[in-house]
Amino acid sequence: MIEFQNVSKAYSPDAMALRDISLTVDKGELVFLAGPSGAGKSTLLKMIAAMERPSAGKVIVNGQDIGQIKRAGLPFLRRNLGLIFQQQRLLTDRSILANVMLPLLVTGASRAQAEQRARAALDKVGLLERALSAPLALSGGEQQRVAIARAIVNRPQIILADEPTANLDRASANQVLDALKAFHSVGVTCLISSHDEQMLDAAARVIHLNHGQLTAGATA
């Protein structure tokens, strides 16, 4: 489902974010990315979403060469991706239900269909009873679970989560991880970057990066 073929990313001659990365992720895998800050984890995830393009090599996602996708094709690529970042970027002027409905409304769903699916997504992360709450009325862990609901409301094939449990207490981090594992259990491919050693210890597959280079885990 995802393949990196000798991929490098340079922001300048002196700033190499990734160096000659080759790896594969099969459909339905749950894969963790580990490594210190600046190791290249975020850049790798952003390449899968075509938020960054490779300086060398190829990134293939669902058979598409990311480097060859035109701007007009990006919405079609990203419709199959659920993106979760540390900064949830929830809109504070509307309810969490309205936040989760937004991706569906943007892609042309009716309000009734968007609300039905958004409520189902919130139910999956255990927050349906808070549907009409404002984002700022929720804890950090609850806000991150709203971000997960928003990411999966389009029923993506791949979830990309960049440090989704950063700055959360252990109980909240476990809730977020349980929500991600629930989607993996029904066949969604998940890539999760994390510094959380407890989370990594329980992982079936971990890809380790350091200074933009693979140190372990390129193959399952």
Image: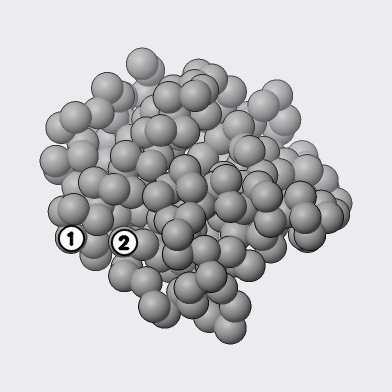
Res. 120 in view = yes
Q: Nearer the viewer, residue 129 or 156?
A: 129
Which quadrant is home to the C terminus? top left
Q: Return the disc, 2 or 1, that comes first in the chain's sequence.
A: 2
Q: Residue at x 37, y 72 (%)?
A: 138
Task: Tell me if residue 118 comes above or below residue 95 in the rendering.
Answer: above
Which quadrant is home to the N terminus? top right
Q: Nearer the viewer, residue 6 or 61?
A: 61
Q: Are marks 2 and 1 in contact (CB under 8 Å)?
A: yes
Q: Residue at x 71, y 44 (%)?
A: 79
Q: Residues within 10 Å of mark 2 (few under 14, many from 20)?
A: many
Task: Tell me if residue 60 comes above or below residue 77 in the rendering.
Answer: above
Please state the horizontal and vertical placement of residue 164, each as a whole percent of the image: 36, 53
In the image as oriented, which residue stretches furthest toward the top?
220
In the image as oriented, which residue stretches furthest toward the front?
129
Q: Is residue 30 left or right of residue 70?
A: left
Q: Residues within 10 Å of mark 1 (few under 14, many from 20)?
A: few
Q: Residue at x 25, y 28 (%)?
A: 203
Label of residue 141 in the image? 2
Q: Secondary structure at mark 1?
A: loop
Please state the horizontal and vertical placement of residue 137, each as a whole percent of the image: 39, 78
Q: Nearer the viewer, residue 18 or 84?
A: 84
Spatial separation of the CA atoms under disc 2 and disc 1: 8 Å
Please state the horizontal and vertical placement of residue 105, each as a whole percent of the image: 77, 59
Name the residue type under label 1: Asp
Task: Tell me if residue 146 comes above or below residue 197 in the rendering.
Answer: below
Please state the horizontal and vertical placement of residue 149, each as a whole percent of the image: 52, 51
Q: Disc 1 marks which residue?
A: 169
Q: Is residue 36 left or right of residue 74?
A: left
Q: Nearer the viewer, residue 68 or 80?
A: 80
Res. 54 in view = no
